[in-house]
Amino acid sequence: MQGSATDPHAPAGHRRARRTAGAVASAALLLPLLGAAPYGSTEEASSTRLQDAFASAAADYHVPQSVLLGVSYLQSRWDTHGGAPSVTGGYGPMHLTDARTALADTAALHHSEGTEDARGDSSRAALLPDTKVPDNGELPARLKTLAKAAQLTGLSAEQLRDDAATNVKGGAALLAAAQKDLGEPLSEDPADWYGAVARFSGADDSATAATYANDVYDVIRDGEQRTTDTGQQVALAAQPGLAPDPAPLRRAGLRTVSADGTECPATVSCEWIPAPYSEFGDGDYGNHDLGDRPASQSIKYIVIHDTEGQWEGVLNLIKDPTYVSWNYTLRSTDGHIAQHVKAKDVAWHAGNWYVNAKSIGLEHEGFLAAPDAWYTEEMYRASARLVKYLSKKYGIPLDRQHILGHDNVPGPTTSTIPGMHTDPGPYWDWQHYFTLLGHPFHGVPASKGSGKGGGGLVTVLPEFAENQPVYTGCVTKGEPCAAHGSSEVRLYSLPDETSPLIKDIGLRPTGADSTIDVNDVGSRVSTGQRYAVADRDGDWTAIWYLGQKAWFKNPKGQPTAVTSFGLVVTPKAGLTEVPVYGRAYPEKEAYPAGVPVQAVSPLPYKLLAGQKYAAGDKVPGEYFYAPTFDTTPHRVVIGKDMYYEIQFGHRVEFVRAADVDLVPSAS
C-alpha cells in the first residue's frame, strides 16, 4: 500500500479546463448546494433537470448533494451516453454496472486479432499469438452494482439503466447503504462520507479505494461545472476547506495491496503483477526482453492502447509466457493500475521493434469499436498521472510525437503496414487527456510565429463532443456506428465531401480507396497531431499527408484545426523525392561482428519535392539486438546516420536527415 494513498489531500493533477455552463450553472455555484438553482424560464428548467435529480436523490437518501455530484463526476462527468454502457458495463451518470448484460459478446483481446506481430522484429520469426481471453467466471461486485441499486430502491434494472434521474437515485442509495454498512451516520457534512465514497468505487483493496475517494474530494474542493452530452447544465460549488476523515475506510476490511517494486507515482493505486520471463521450447522465450534502459538506450515514447478485453481476462493473458506483453494495464471502473514489465526492460506491444525498444506501453480497459462504450474519468486521470510521472522520470516530452496511440505507430516494413493495429481509435478523447496531463492543445495567432514558421502548421483540434464523423463496422461490417464524439477528422482529395478520400498505398497497394470503417486510418488525422499547410479554400484546409495534398473541412465557426508553428522537413534541393521509413535503423557499417545487419527498408511512401511535414526529434539510427533468452549476446547498435521523425500520415514515420532540409514551417 502506498504511503500517500489514504491522504485525502493527495494532488489530483491538472484538471480539465471547465467550459462555461451558462447563467443558471454559474448561479448554482453560489448556492450552498442544498438544492438546484431556481428556474428562470421553461428552457432553463429543461436544462437543469439533471441538477434537480441530484438534489432530489440527495434529499431522499440523506446523502450530501456535493458527495453525490462529486462521485458522479468521477464516473461519467455527469454524461448519460445515450443510455449505452461504458467499457465495463456501467450505465448513466452514476455508472451503475451490469457488466454481464452489457458486455456479453466481448471476448477477444485485440492482440489476438489481425496479423500484427506485437514484437515487430524482422530478425526473429514472427510472433503471432493466438491466445484467447479466458472466461472470467463470476464477475466481481464492482461490475454488478446496478442489481444492488435495484434491490435498495425497488426500481427496475431497466429504469436504472435508461433514465438518468432514476440512475442518480440508485447511486444515492448505494452511497447511503455503504455509509450504514460502515456504521456511520447519514450526516449532512460531506467530510463524514469518505469511507462510503471509497466503497462506492467497488475496489477490493484499500489503496485503490482511497485514491478514488481522494479524487472525489478533490473535485468537491475545486468545484466543477459543465454542460453534459444532453445539454444539461450541472454545477458543483467549490468547498476548498473540506477535509474528510479517512478513518472509516481503515475499518472497511479491504485487502492491502503492496506497491513494492512498482514504478508508479504515489498519487495512484498500483500493484506488481509481473509478466513472466521464461524459456520454453526450442529456443523460444517470452514474453519480453530484459534490457538496461535508459542507460543503454533512451525511452522516448509512451504508447496508448486499449485492451479489447475485460480486466480479469487481460491479467490472465499477461501471466502467459507464450503471449505478448506491455508495461501497465489500467482498470476502467476505478483507475487501478497493474505494472507487468519494468521500464528498463522491453515489452512486446507496439508491432515495431524500433518503437518497442524505446517505449513504454499502457493498456486501458476498453473497446475500440464500441462507440458508446465510454472510458471513466477516473481511468483518464490515473493514466494521466502515470504518464506525467513517466514523462518526468525519463524525459519524455508531453506531445503527440512522443505520446502515441497504437494507431500512430508505423509499420516497420511494407509488408507489415496492413496488419498494424488501430487502437485506441477515434473515440479516445485526446484533448481531455492532454488537458489532464497539463498540456492542452491550443492555437496561436499566426503573427506569433512570424519568422519561426507561424501559420505554416496546423494542430488538429476538433471539439470532441460536436465532432461526430460517420464510421462503419463497429458491430456489422458496412453498417454505420452509433453517433459519437470523436478526436479524428476525415481527409478528402478535394475540398468537397463528395470527393474521394485520400488513398493509402501502404494499406492498399492496389490503389483501392480508403473507407470510413472505424479501423481504417488511411484517410484521417487525430487531435493534437501537427501537419504542414498545403493550401486553403474557404472553409477548407489542405495539408501534406502521405505524399498527397489532403483536404479537411475547417470552418471558422467550428474549426477542426488551429494555427501552430514549428519546424518542418522538405527534400533537399535537387531531390525530386525522398524515401520514407517505418523505423530508424543504423547503416550497415555500424553493426559489430556477431550482430546481423538489419535492412534499412523504405516504405512504399515518398516525400516529394515541394512538400513539407512537421518535424519531431532528430535521432541516430538504433537497433536493439536481443534474439536469445540469454542476455549475454544482446547489443544496442547505434549508427552515425541520422533521422528525423515526421508526422507523415496518421502514423509517424522517419526520413534520413541527409535527404532533407529542416526549415521554419512558413518559409
Image (tube, grey):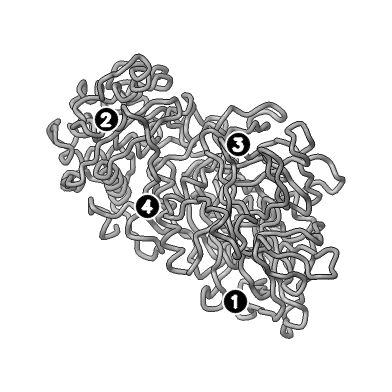
Tell which tag, 3 or 4, sits nearer the viewer: 4
The amino acid type of the residue labelled 4 equals: His
The amino acid type of the residue labelled 3 equals: Ala
Q: Are marks 1 and 4 in contact (CB under 8 Å)?
A: no
Quarter of the figure that contains the C terminus:
bottom right
Residue extending farthest to the bottom is: 593
The amino acid type of the residue labelled 1 equals: Thr
**Is residue 3 visible to the viewer in this orientation of the structure?**
yes
Please give the residue where the numbered disc 2 appears in the rendered image: 27
The amino acid type of the residue labelled 2 equals: Ala
Whole-Å distance between the Cαs marked 3 and 2?
39 Å
Please give the residue where the numbered disc 4 appears in the rendered image: 14
Residue at coordinates 32% horizontally, 60% vertically from top-left? 266
Label 1 vs 3, first from the N-terminus: 3
Label 3 vs 2, first from the N-terminus: 2
Q: Using the rendered view, name the quadrant where residue 66 is placed.
A: top left
Q: Is 123 situated left or right of 209 in this image? A: right
Q: Is 467 situated left or right of 608 in this image? A: left
Q: Is 236 situated left or right of 417 in this image? A: left
**Is residue 166 visible to the viewer in this orientation of the structure?**
no
Please give the residue where the numbered disc 1 appears in the rendered image: 631
Whole-Å distance between the Cαs marked 1 and 4?
41 Å
Question: Callout 2: helix, strand or loop?
Answer: helix
Q: Is 494 situated left or right of 390 in this image? A: right
Q: Which disc is residue 369 wearing? A: 3
Quarter of the figure that contains the N terminus:
bottom left
